Image (cartoon, rainbow, N blue to C red):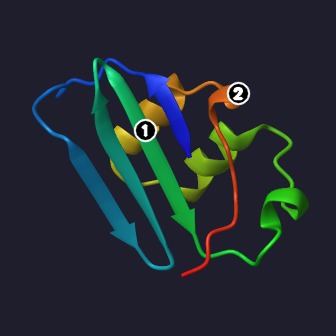
């Protein structure tokens, strides 16, 4: 998940975008005043945040996972700094 100031082309027009695929999805939400949150939900084993290697960082890792998905996903990931990303386990 990430939270950042982001200059989206549709700022103020679209509040919530969801991109759904097999065992994963990506959400972008406008939280106001030019700020956005995004979430990448991936079907992973508990503890994967500590065990999955990301030698090029989380942004590159996620861009590789979401290759060929919407350009919106790649635009917001490109605008995200590594320190703005938090990874944690979720149980459904």
Q: Residue at x 38, y 32 (%)?
A: 36
- Seen as rendered, the residue at the extreme left is 13
Residue 73: x %, y % from top left: 40, 43
56 lies left or right of 3: right
Secondary structure, mark 2, is: helix
In depth, the one of 57 and 27 nearer the eye is 27
Q: Is residue 39 above or below residue 2?
A: below
Q: Mark 2 vs mark 1: which is more N-terminal?
A: 1
Provide the residue designation for mark 2: 83
Q: Is residue 71 visible?
A: no
State whether residue 61 is above or below residue 78.
below
Instruction: Report if the CB atoms under discs 2 and 1 are less than 8 Å apart.
Output: no
Q: Which residue is painted at 75% across and 78% down in the image? A: 45
Image location (x, y in percent) of residue 29: 32, 42
Q: Is residue 50 left or right of residue 11?
A: right
Image: 34 above or below 87: above
């Amino acid at each position: 998940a990430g939270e950042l100031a982001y200059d989206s082309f549709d700022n103020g027009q679209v509040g919530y975008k969801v991109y759904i695929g097999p065992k994963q999805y990506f959400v972008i939400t406008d939280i106001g005043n030019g700020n956005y949150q995004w979430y990448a939900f991936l079907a992973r084993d508990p503890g994967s945040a500590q065990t999955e290697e990301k030698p090029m960082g989380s942004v590159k890792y996620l861009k590789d996972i979401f290759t060929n998905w919407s350009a919106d996903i790649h635009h917001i990931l490109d605008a995200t700094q590594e320190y703005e990303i938090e990874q944690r386990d979720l149980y459904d």
